[in-house]
Amino acid sequence: MKEKNLKNNLKQLSLIVDWFEDQEEVDVEEGLNKVKEAVIIFKEAKKQFSEIENQFEEIKKEVE
């Protein structure tokens, strides 16, 4: 199983965007599946951003 980290999630989202941009005519079912996949990845990335933000806040408190 692929390691789930922010860098990988952002790369996966970028690949999905590229897929849509490369399509001359989007297959609706495949497009819907790509959107569903992107939503799952986006939610995970948002959670990871939040965790990183919390870590920065903790470090900031330690420094002050």
Image (tube, rainbow, N blue to C red):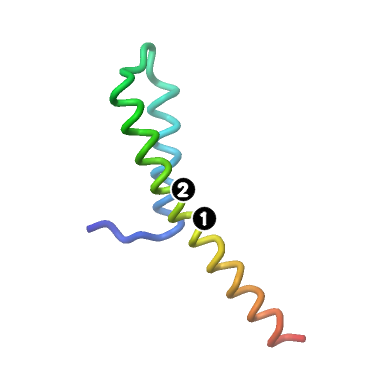
Q: Position of residue 46 (x, y in %)?
A: 52, 55
- Local packing at callout 1 (Cα closer than 10 Å; few below 14, some 14-19, many 20+) is few
Q: Residue at x 39, y 53 (%)?
A: 8
Left or right relative to 56: residue 51 = left
The residue furthest left is: 1
Q: Quadrant of the C terminus?
A: bottom right
Farthest residue to the right: give it: 64
* Mark carried by residue 42: 2
Residue 14, image x and y in percent? 45, 39
How far is disc 1 from disc 2 in space, using C-alphas? 6 Å
Residue 63 is labelled as none
| Badge count | 2
Above or below 37: residue 53 = below
Residue 16, quarter of picture: top left
What residue sits 36% from the left and 17% below the top? Answer: 26
21 above or below 50? Answer: above
Comparing 8 with 45, the one in front is 45
Give the crowd class for mark 2: few <14, some 14-19, many >=20 residues within 10 Å: some
Image spot of residue 42 (x, y percent)? 46, 48
Q: Name the residue under label 1.
A: 46
63 sits to left or right of 38: right
Q: Which residue is drawn at 65% across and 81% down?
A: 59
- Name the secondary structure under disc 2: helix
For this rendering, which residue is in front, 12 or 44? 44
| Label pair 1/2, CB-CB below 8 angstroms | yes
Mark 2: which amino acid?
Phe
Specify the quadrant of the image occupied by residue 63: bottom right
Is residue 1 shown left or right of residue 49?
A: left
State the residue at coordinates (29%, 26%). 30
Check the picture and name the quadrant holding the N terminus: bottom left
Q: Which amino acid does label 1 sit on?
A: Lys
